[in-house]
Image (cartoon, rainbow, N blue to C red):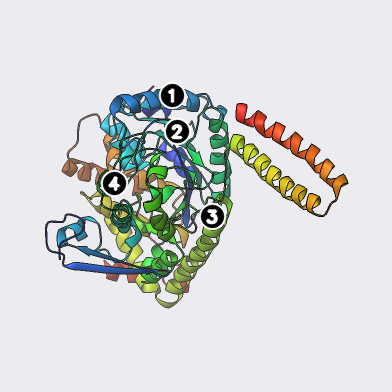
Amino acid sequence: MLCCVCKEKTATVHLTQIAGEKIQKVDLCEECAKTKGVNDQTGFSLADLLLGLGASQELEQAAGGAEVKCPTCGFSQADFKKTGRLGCATCYQTFAEGLEGLLKSMHKGTHHSGKVPESLRQKRDYSEQLSQLQKKLAKAIETENFESAAQLRDEIKLVSGRLAATLVA
Amino acid sequence: MDLDHFLVSTAEGALRKGPHDRIVMSSRVRLARNLKAGAFPGWAKKPERVRILELIRPAVESSPDLKGAFSETMDNLGPLDKQILVERHLISREHAAKNAGSGVILNRDETLCVMINEEDHLRMQALRPGLQLRQAWSAIDRLDSELERKLDYAFSNDLGYLTACPTNLGTGIRVSAMLHLPGLVLAEQINPIIQSVNKLGLAVRGLYGEGTEALGNVFQVSNQMTLGESESSIVERLEKVLSQIIEHEENARQTLLEKKPKTIYNHIGRAYGILANAHSISSKETMNLLSLMRLGVEVGLFPSVQGPLVDELFILTQPAHLQKQHSEKLSAEERDLLRADMLRERLKPVSRPVARRGGSAAPGLDKAG
């Protein structure tokens, strides 16, 4: 078995980490194990080591072996394999499929929760308000509550106006 | 601008106090941000990195929190200045290796530091002495909110702030504290603690971050996951874990003093003996021994020591800081000699440790030497 970092020497160090339901295995030659700090059994975190490796494998699988390149920056999965980093913001769309599994194993969730830039937050709030109002409107029409439907329609007009204003800005 | 004149003096720096600073040396919150347009620094060619640097730099410089800040491109900083910034934990080792197309902006009191074109276009961090994660977070949150008005960040509703490495995706936040844990190390309880902290999804690293050893019994604890959890909940989670580690460290020290006073006096006495009398000493040995002396000060074995002395020596004895005090270029061997000279000089007024508990003074230490 070859070392999965240098792909040259025979792997003599075998590591297995079970994170949640996922089992990850790494095979390293002695030299790579040393440079990656695997011998230090205390502070060493397998996750750090795995990020580059596991990620590149998943990306490769997702691409079905074909060479996919990011249309914006020309980055390929081979580059990701080499560096463990992506090329630009668009890469997250280009390689979305391959990244999904990786993000799941790496993070608490796959959906952002936390700070949102102010400009986008407003936009998002208005869109959410809008879809809520539209749901209410559909319900009002269904139950033939026309008085409330008319009121909702006015509100929708108002909110979509605000949303349009943020998009222009 | 001259970095030497800008930086806070080591004596002044060591005087800074914070909650729980017996154990928590400093708190830090770092945010990773990128611009929508332009490849990430590791993939961008030099002209693009320069263009991005020129776009970001004025935006950062003009923010009110960074008024009168030190701002320089990495190619204009000498290797010694870069190393000084690394030793003060203001920039990463990775950033110190950068040249044209990267920059650093640092405020007067060294509590805010922005790296441009490190791994991401923007890496901004707030530092505070002692355990002050919330304060550090709110300081960096403010700078970030100010910058987002001037810079077009790469952000996706689903994935949050987009970063060069998927490990930083989402909030782009790294909340960390630098802990001095000699008690847990001496009591041989540090490994199980590290393991259980790891199990909680937090990373434990050495003094200079990723891939470095825990010199001087100093450990960095930080969050590892950045996606799917809000900043405040990450800060809260870390706070909880840290307060437990603090308790364990206090307990370990207490137990050692009660059950194995000779062991602890022996370690501290020997550390003092070497530091105060050596004629050649490496920075690694210095840090490990200063750690024991810091413990000695905290448990009352050095009543004559003024609090910040040990912390100042911690930084002053590091290679670049030592070199700065001498005009000629020093080899590693010469540094070891000068380091020992400085330590003997600075420790001259410090009397040897007294064994407080049980009233039995130094004889145990004499036997140990």
Q: Which mark is residue A82?
A: none
Q: Closer to the camera, B281 or B144? A: B144
Badge 1 marks a residue whose secondary structure is: helix
The amino acid marked with disc number 2 is Leu
Q: Which mark is residue A77?
A: 4
Q: Position of residue B162 (x, y in %)?
A: 45, 42
Residue ranking furthest to the right? A147
Q: Which mark is residue B35?
A: 2
Q: Are the residues under badges 1 and 4 in a single subunit?
A: no
Q: Is residue B239 above or below residue A77?
A: below
Given contact means CB atoms under 8 Å apart, are the residues at marks 3 and 2 in contact? no
Give the mark nearest the N terminus, 1 or 3: 1
The amino acid marked with disc number 4 is Gln
Question: Which of the two discs, 2 and 4, sits closer to the camera?
Answer: 4
Q: Which mark is residue B55?
A: 1
Residue A169: tell me if it is visible: no
Q: Position of residue B342 (x, y in %)?
A: 29, 43
Name the residue that disc number 3 marks.
B229
Q: Residue B368 is drawn in which quadrant? A: bottom left
| Left or right side of B186 for B111 | right
Chain letter for the residue marked with disc 2 in the picture: B
Given contact means CB atoms under 8 Å apart, are the residues at marks 2 and 1 in contact? yes
Q: Specify the quadrant that holds the N terminus of chain B.
A: top left
Residue B236: tell me if it is visible: yes
